[in-house]
Amino acid sequence: MRNERLTRITVRILIVLLPLLLFEVLVRMRILDPFTFIPFTEMIRTMGKLLMTQQFVSDSIIPTAGEAMASFISAAVIGILFGIVLWRSDSLYHTVQPYLMLFYAVPVFAIYPVFISLFGTGPLPVIIVGFLFAVVTVITNTAIGFRETKNVFIKVGKSLNLNFRQMLFHVYIPAAWPYIFTGLKLALAYSIIGVVATEFILSTRGLGHSIAFAYNNFDLKGMYGGILLVIAIILVVNTILGYFESALYNRNMKGH
Amino acid sequence: MSNTWHSVGRYTLPVGLFILWEALYLLVKEPAMASPWQSIVALVNNAGEWLTDIGITLTALLVSFAICAVMGTIFGFFVGLSSFWTQTIHPILLALYSIPKVTLYPVFLLVFGLTVEGRIAFSVFHGIFPICIICMEATRMIPKTYLKLATAYQMSFVQKVRYIIIPAILPQLVVGLRMGFSLCFLGLILSEMFASYKGLGYRLTHYMALNQTSAILALFLIVIFLAFFFTFIFLLWQERMERKIGKTERMIEADSRGQDRS
């Protein structure tokens, strides 16, 4: 059993590393066009260099981080509140639910130009797109989390004569929390993606802008460095939150 | 009784959104905002000119989705046949699924140039992962009794695929295809917005430069309409599946897994 896990991890690492190694060799041997690709090690080095550059941090990373945080926090607060409303009101839940599903299909970025004409090219339109991209998953996960509270728990709470506030803090929230956490985890990733993507299409600052700018100026190293940085950030965020998430679900399973 | 109320609520929601839109327009006025009426006028006036753009975007979308569906299903299916490979590859696919793929579009531009092939390739890359993941999991979780039945009937591999495996994975696959389609569309619009001389996404950025809000909103209505139209077809298909076999635990699971989009 343990042996199989070990082989699985080894194979997984090989699947990731071998193509990168092959890519590195092909680029270094100039079989792949050197005007299109740069060696992977070079990308890592540029990423490191970008992270060390004061100006890159203050012009690209900090604005993007700020915008992503703003859209995440607003999505979290409004999403949870709206999710609670959908939990309390059955008729509203059934009215809105199909639209929430359809909302996933809408390419939200298409509305970005409207926000630019409404709010100018400041951070606000970027934050709103990130918010719209992230909020639906918080709403659905919160509503489902509360709605799926096991009847046994509710009955126990009722039989102990808990009032609504006590029910909320001792029954509903603990039961719904893993779902809500999943929603928040996805929302954080979506906020970052939404913000970077909108910056990438049109904006004057931020990580997404720096990649688009590097592309437009034939700065291959800067472009690949920026891309790698964005991917690395998302992977790190997802891994950390995913770890907490599975711990949360495991604990909940044991508690049952 | 409550059902009629729900459907009344469902129809009033879009009406409410239009009223909100009109209110917003009255609040900020032109040129920052256009009224619903102005947008519909812009839509009618430009319809002839935009028809080619809609055609270009739709063709690219359908081509890329077809590639996505075929490649994603085949890949997911063959990996899913082996439990070892499924468990090995699953985290890698999830990680690829979660990265912001837009930032990789410049790489596609460098490889393909400003061509429709480049946009299709990017759109495929943007939409294929949910199809792979869901098809893989669906294939892996086919109940063992089904496969035993196939052995009992001494079915050939082709027969097994045709009569047992495809019907068994299709209900979940439909969910995956729906997610993949939405992501293909998103990827295509993004790539057109970033760099292109054709298509709906290009028109959006074009009118943004001209500051014609009514045209932008009209285009946005077209985009929403297309997204809803195709999603609706997928949902009908999904509903038919559900009627046939009953909504299963696995479909709900596939649905929630598919939400992990980017």
Image: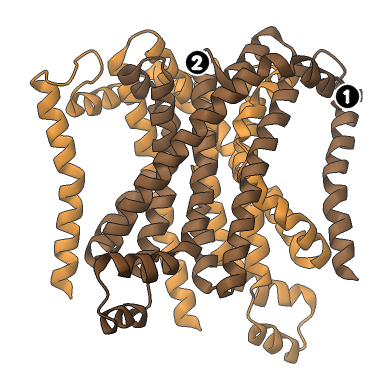
Judging depth in this view, the residue of B68 and A4 nearest the camera is: B68
Q: Quadrant of residue A142?
A: bottom right
Residue A10: x and y, percent?
Answer: 14, 56
Tell me which chain the residue with mark 2 is part of: B
Residue type (three-letter) at the residue carrying disc 1:
Trp
Q: Colour of chain B?
A: brown
Q: CA distance from mark 2 to mark 1?
A: 29 Å
Residue at 70% in and 24% down: B219
Residue at 32% in and 52% down: B74
Q: Residue under circle 1?
A: B37
Quadrant for the N terminus of chain B in the image? bottom right
Residue type (three-letter) at the residue carrying disc 2:
Ser
Q: Residue furthest left?
A: A29
Residue B140: x and y, percent?
Answer: 33, 68
Residue B92: x and y, percent?
Answer: 30, 50
- Coloring applied to the structure: by chain
Task: State the count of labels.
Answer: 2
Q: Colour of chain A?
A: orange
Sequence-wise first label, 2 or 1: 1
Judging depth in this view, the residue of B195 and A141 nearest the camera is: B195
Query: Going by the image, does B118 lie left or right of A95?
Result: left
Q: Quadrant of residue A37?
A: top left
Judging depth in this view, the residue of B26 and B185 nearest the camera is: B185
Q: Residue under circle 2?
A: B196
Residue at 69% in and 17% down: A120
Question: What SS does tag 1 mark?
Answer: helix
Question: A164 above or below B6?
Answer: below
Question: What SS does tag 2 mark?
Answer: loop
Mark 2 crowd level (few <14, some 14–19, many ≥20, 10 Å Cα): some
